Every structure is written in structure tokens, then in C-alpha cells.
Image (cartoon, grey):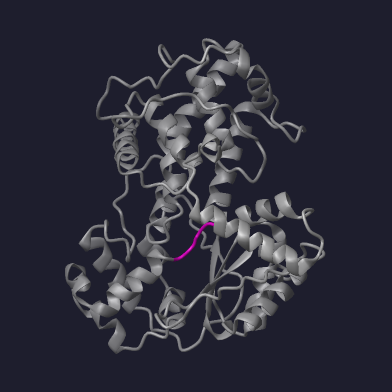
Amino acid sequence: MRVAILVSGKPHLEAPKLLGVPIISDSTGLSQKNAVVNLLSTWEVTDNVIGLFFDTTASNTGIHRGCATLLEQQLGRAVLWLACRHHVYELHIKHVWSAVIGDSNSPIEPLLKRFQQEWENLDRDTHNLCLFEWPDDEESFSYQQGRKVLDWGQSHLASQSFPREDYRELIELTVIFLGGTLPAGRNFQFRKPGAHRRARFMHIAIYALKMQMLSERFQLDQNELSQIKTISDYIVLSHSMAFLRSRLASCAPTVDLQFIGGMCQYLEEAILDGRNSHFWRTMMINKLKKNPRPTSFVSAKPKMPQFENTIPTLIDLIGQRSWLIFHLQRCTSKEIEWMQFESSNWEKFEDYRFLRDIINGMKVVNDSAERGVKLITDFRNVVHNEEQQQFLLQVVENHRQEVSLNGRKQQLG
């Protein structure tokens, strides 16, 4: 079951302590919908649902029989559709890989498999690596974007602002490839290539950067050398930062547009992303206020706007349906009074800060669902009684939260 629920963020609402996740016989949209509806009823939070976040499979997103569609019909009202940003960005890098390397009928990319098989015989010394070739023109996009990504990566490594070790690995590879250094006290080393399965979103990026940096030691023909260099440049200049920032709900729309816009340098423009300019935030609210606030919203799969020969800004995308988040949060006219003022004054309003915190806390990736699937896969055969299985999964998950291994299995000894 890979559709998760976003309930209203009102302070009085407490998350249920007993998960009781049902085991379903198949992954059709209908079966998933029924399981979710039963959970909502058990938790007594049906009336508080304001959004769904899910991966981008047809069983979730189908316009007629997708789980998200059926759930919205069951609820009888429109809710937020939050497709997993990691699944979306995974498609981007897969398309680049296919365009550069070519399509393969194998479930495992032959080049990735070859690299994994030869890993133990490679010289993995971290000196004299094949790194990013900085252009001479410091005003060029490649140079400016490279500096931006490098500064961003080193800043986040210094503050350790990443929730998972594979996120850290991707940032470290990106920083090293751009010629940067790691924080004091941490030495760079190559980690053994992990599984290249579909659920591991970053595997292509991590593999490609390792192959490029070790390309003088890993046997590649001239065509493969050129292909891996092209992909690696794409990863560090466009993919890594966008992928890792995409999980932040408040800036995801801006990140998406910057990415789709290719190499365009746009201003940060999201309404609730405090890092964006006051001018653009005020302009967006002014555009929103020009669209009368609807009293109801049609429940249906969102339709993507079409733009020809132009890259839209977030202002271009604002319309009547942009009021949906305020409708779902039941914001009264008094609770959006902050819109009447310039954005530099919004932080003074408690209602704005409350809504900002709601947005910042939203899930726009379903990593938790992927981890849940992995958890069930690992322990599904330990016990056969469903109730005992539920208790076992909760004990394992609770233990993982309490015990921090920092990625080092030897600490178990």
C-alpha cells in the first residue's frame, strides 16, 4: 500500500499510536483504497484528511481506477494530490540515461552491473580522480551553477542537514566531483556500490559519479567515457541539488520549475518559502486575490497546464484552484488577513506562521512507504499470525528509531 494520508495539522489532532496497517491481497487501486478507508475509519480521522501523497504508478494515479482518484471520490471532496517528488526526479535521470547511454532490455543496466562486479579489483584511492572540468568563462552558466551547487553542498554537509546516509553519499560525491572538500574530521572514501533496484532512487546518480571519478581505472571505451562524463555533468549541475531539495514542500514548486526550465536562473518564488524575494511573494498573492475564492472544489485528478514555447513562472500557474489549501485548512477571512500586507510583514501574523508550518511539515515524497515495504519484506516470514506480525513490525520500527547506528553495523557488536 503506497498511498499515504495527510491529515489536518490542527494542534489538537494526535497521531494514532497503533498503526494496524492491513495486508492486502493485491496492489490494485480499489484494494488500496479500501485498505486506506478502513484505516481512516479505525483511526477516526476521515474528516481530517487534506491530502494524499503517493508514488506515480498507474494504480495510484489512474484517472478512473487509481487509488488517489477512488479515495477522493470516497471522501466526497477535493484534496491535495502530492505525487512523490523522488519518483518524478527518478524519471528525469532515467530519461537522461536512456538518451545518452541508450535503452536496455535488461532489468539491470549492463554498465552498472559491470562496475559493481569489478569493484573489488579497482584502485579506490581518492587522489588523482577524474573531476568536473570547470569552464574558463566564470560568467557561463556551467561555472555559475557549479559554484551554486558546490556552496550549497558544502553548507549542508557542514550542518549535517540530511535524514539518510544515501543522501549524504550523493552530496559528498557531488561536492568532491566539483573539487570541494568535506567538513573537518570527515575523510572522503568510496562506498561499495549498493543495489541498483528501482526503489533506490539515487542509484544511477551515485553509480555514474563513481564511474566518472574512477574512469581512468575502470575500463571504459571512448564512447562510454564520453557518455559517463556527460551524465555526471548533468547530475552535479542539474540533478543532485534539485532531487535533494524536492522533498521540501515549501520550495518544491520552485525547484520543479527551475529544473524544467533547464539551465535558466530564476528567482526563488514560492509563497510560503521564506527564502524567496518579497517582491515575487507579494506578486503571487496579488495574482491569487484576483481569482475569486471558490466555495467548493471539484474532486478530480489535477490537470497539468499546457505552455508552448515558454517556461512558466509560479505566478503563471496561480488560479482559482490555488485556493484549495486554504479551503482544506478551513481558513476564514480573518485568518488570511496577512494577505492584505506586504510579504515582509507576514511573519508578524500567527495565522501565517501556522499555515507556513503546516506547509513545511507536508510530505511530498513517500520514502516512508518505500521503507515500510522493505520492512514488511524483511520480516514477513518471521511470524504468520497477522496480529503478531503487526506487533513485530512496530517493535522493529520503534527499535530503529531509538538506536542510532550512524550507518555503522559494527556498533551492534
Q: Is residue 29 magenta?
A: no
Residue 241 at x, y = what percent?
41, 42
Camera-side residue of 411 and 144:
411
Q: Tell me the chief SS of the magenta region.
A: loop
Camera-side residue of 204 and 393:
393
Q: Is residue 74 visible?
A: yes
Quarter-of-image position of residue 91: top right
| Count of marks placed on residues | 0
Is residue 120 positioned above or below 43 on the image? above
Q: Is residue 19 left or right of residue 7?
A: right
Quadrant location of the C terminus in the rendered image: top right
Residue 14 at x, y = what percent?
48, 78
Magenta range is 362-366
Q: Is residue 107 left or right of residue 295?
A: right
Identify the residue shown where x is 78% and y is 58%: 383
Q: Is residue 35 left or right of residue 298?
A: right
Camera-side residue of 194 and 324:
194
Quarter-of-image position of residue 27: bottom right
Is residue 153 positioned above or below 272 on the image? above
Q: Is residue 261 visible?
A: no
Identify the residue shown where x is 46% and y is 81%: 13
Residue 75 at x, y = what percent?
62, 83
Quadrant location of the N terminus in the rendered image: bottom right
Q: Is residue 4 left or right of residue 164?
A: right
Residue 35 at x, y = what percent?
72, 73
Camera-side residue of 67 and 283:
67
Q: Is residue 364 magenta?
A: yes
Identify the residue shown where x is 53% and y is 18%: 226
